[in-house]
Image (cartoon, rainbow, N blue to C red):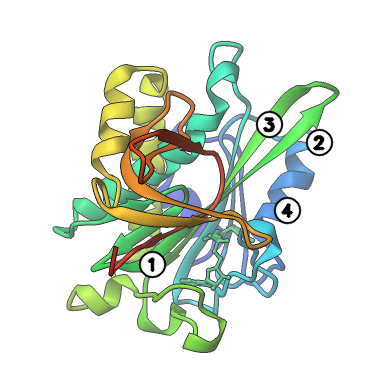
């Protein structure tokens, strides 16, 4: 992968500018700095390797060279989109899931930001915002996909089992084509983000739907219940043991095997 090849592969998409790096700390850091400056809508940062890739809560995201897709897309939301920014994680998740689905696989979205294959994490999403006073100026969508086997970290840094596309296909798919297809899917889906059908597709993609789960929300706080859907803002809806609906805005979902 290099800048020229990327420009060529992505030339038909209505992107802003594209910045490619052989190696970078985090594509999200680069995109946040660019977004705070003069980046146009749909500007893109792509790296062959990340040395300080980040997940949520500053958890590490492993991106060794030439084996993963690591990129950050900058959105400058329109006034119409601004009330729905909490759906952007769903927009990213569905774009990745649709693209992986086109490879003949059956991905699921582990709410809020993981893409699972065979119950293991194949991709993660990190959404970060750039504020201008009280207003959101830009949204940075960071996406990491494990393409080749080497992208999967050793189990000691993992909070959840991981997998790559190569593990489930006979060979690793082309990273540029994968990037193209995820971006094309996201661009096509973006105008529908406000629709009821978007929420339906997002709900349908959820892993553990109808199952008993535990959601860990940090500092030893957690809730348990059955997944019954999503709120309009993308929060997870659970039914607790008393049949009461509980809404979760943030957390790590785990299946309760012996519930
Ligand atoms: C995420 O966070 O899953 C968000 C990952 C976003 C990565 C992209 S890559 C491009 C852009 N630039 C960045 O710096 N980040 C974004 P979270 O749900 O908090 O999961 C983090 C956890 O996933 C870690 O604590 C590890 O246990 C695990 N992990 C790290 N690397 C992994 C990998 N390659 N595959 C699967 N799991 C991984």
Q: Residues within 10 Å of mark 4 (few under 14, many from 20)?
A: some
Q: Which mark is residue 30?
A: 4
Label 3 to label 1: alpha-carbon separation: 27 Å
Q: Is mark 1 within 8 Å of ligand 1?
A: yes
Please tell me which of labels 1 and 2 falls first in the chain.
2
- Whole-angstrom CA distance, mark 3 to mark 2, is 10 Å
Q: Say which label, 3 or 1, has the lower sequence index.
A: 1
Left/right of residue 54 with respect to residue 175 in the rendered view: right
Q: Contact, CB < 8 Å: mark 4 with mark 1?
A: no
Write the residue at 64% across / 71% down: 60
Quadrant assignment for ligand 1: bottom right
- Residue 135: where, in percent of width, then height? 76, 21
| Disc 2 secondary structure class | loop
- The residue identified by callout 1 is 121
Mark 4, secondary structure of its residue? helix
What residue does disc 2 label?
A: 37
- The quarter of the image holding the C terminus is bottom left
Q: Which of these two is toward me, 235 or 60?
A: 235
């Amino acid at each position: 992968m290099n800048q020229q090849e990327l420009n060529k592969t992505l030339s038909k998409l209505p992107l802003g500018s594209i910045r490619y790096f052989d190696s970078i700390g985090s594509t999200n850091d680069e995109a946040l700095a660019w977004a705070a400056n003069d980046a146009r809508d749909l500007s893109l940062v792509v790296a062959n390797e990340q040395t300080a890739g980040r997940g949520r809560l500053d958890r590490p995201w492993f991106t060794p060279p030439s084996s993963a897709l690591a990129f950050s897309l900058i959105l400058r939301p329109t006034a119409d989109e601004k009330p729905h920014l909490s759906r952007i994680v769903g927009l990213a998740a569905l774009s990745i899931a649709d693209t992986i689905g086109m490879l003949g696989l059956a991905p699921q979205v582990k709410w809020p930001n993981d893409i699972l294959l065979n119950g293991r994490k194949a991709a993660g999403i990190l959404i970060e915002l750039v504020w201008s006073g009280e207003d959101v100026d830009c949204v940075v969508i960071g996406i990491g996909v494990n393409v080749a086997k080497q992208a999967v970290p050793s189990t000691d840094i993992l909070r959840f089992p991981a997998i790559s596309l190569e593990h489930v296909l006979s060979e690793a798919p082309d990273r540029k084509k994968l990037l193209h297809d995820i971006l094309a899917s996201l661009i096509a889906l973006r105008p529908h983000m406000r629709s009821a059908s978007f929420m339906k597709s997002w709900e349908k993609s959820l892993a553990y739907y109808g199952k008993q789960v535990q959601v860990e929300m940090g500092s030893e706080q957690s809730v348990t219940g059955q997944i019954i859907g999503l709120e309009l803002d993308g929060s997870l809806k659970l039914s607790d043991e008393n049949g009461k609906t509980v809404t979760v805005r943030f957390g790590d979902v785990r299946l309760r095997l012996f519930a």
